[in-house]
Image (cartoon, rainbow, N blue to C red):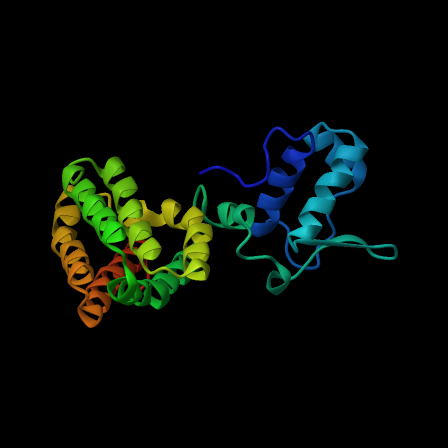
Amino acid sequence: MTAAYPAQARHAQVVHGLGARIVRGELGPGSPVPTEDELVSQFEVGRSALREGVKVLAGKGLLESRTSAGTRVRPRESWNLLDPDVLRWRYAPEASPADIRILADLRVALEPGAARLAAEAASSAQRGAIAGALAGLSATVDEPAAFIEADLAFHRAVFIAANNDLLLYIHDVVSVALGAIRPLHTHSVGHNRQTLPSHQRVATAIQRGHHRQAEAAMREIVEGARGDALRETGGRP
């Protein structure tokens, strides 16, 4: 996954290094960040780069600086949770079981509705794109890594066909995290083969404009994926 904040910026190592520590819980809410001297030494940057990095993290809602209290970590409810970097730090290289459940729940909340809208509003070109994405799934079913990419492409094609720019925007932002947890339920060739009929039902329902069937078929997919994720992380399916 590509980080949203440019890695080549001089202060990027402060942004990504310190931001990841905060999001992953190494620095809890209300905790003071290490001193400037400690951070300058740790990240091997100048003070101006360090301060710029802290400013970026403040803009993401992770830090606040006060004259009397110094720079401290803000509570989680203040974070910009849909910021691509915050999502990346939260879900890669490894997400907590609780965060995986949250993302799986979000899919259940969003994707059946997107499939319903696609059945109602998709253009002929968008239906063709969904059919092409389905063909990509079939072609890669024996290759888990390629299947993950094809699966992401299929679901994005459905969101595009919903013709709702806000919904697509949310999907594209959250896809940073979706790509990180897909291997939890697309790592088995046998399992991937089992999911193909469900994807076919979604595509067919959208092609025919059957919105209820599209919604139901997509719900079957995302609820199954949610169950897989919970089982893999020790939760209840």
Left or right for 199, reference 112: left
Up-down relation of residue 3 to residue 124 (above or below): above
Looking at the image, which is closer to me, 20 or 61?
61
Q: Residue furthest front?
A: 124
Residue 137 drawn at (x, y percent): 19, 43
Q: Residue at x 65, y 31 (%)?
A: 9
Residue 111 drawn at (x, y percent): 32, 62
Q: Residue furthest bottom?
A: 212
Looking at the image, which is closer to me, 140 or 189?
140
Q: Residue at x 15, y 63 (%)?
A: 208
Q: Residue at x 44, y 38 (%)?
A: 1
Total residue callouts: 0
On-image quarter of the C terminus: bottom left
Left or right for 110, reference 54: left
Looking at the image, which is closer to me, 161 or 18?
161
Residue 15 drawn at (x, y percent): 64, 40
Q: Residue at x 36, y 65 (%)?
A: 110
**Could you tell me if residue 120 is visible in this image?**
yes
| Image-quadrant location for residue 46 | top right
| Image-quadrant location for residue 187 | top left
Looking at the image, which is closer to me, 158 or 110?
158
Left or right for 224, reference 54: left
Residue 107 drawn at (x, y percent): 35, 61
**Could you tell me if residue 188 is visible in this image?**
no
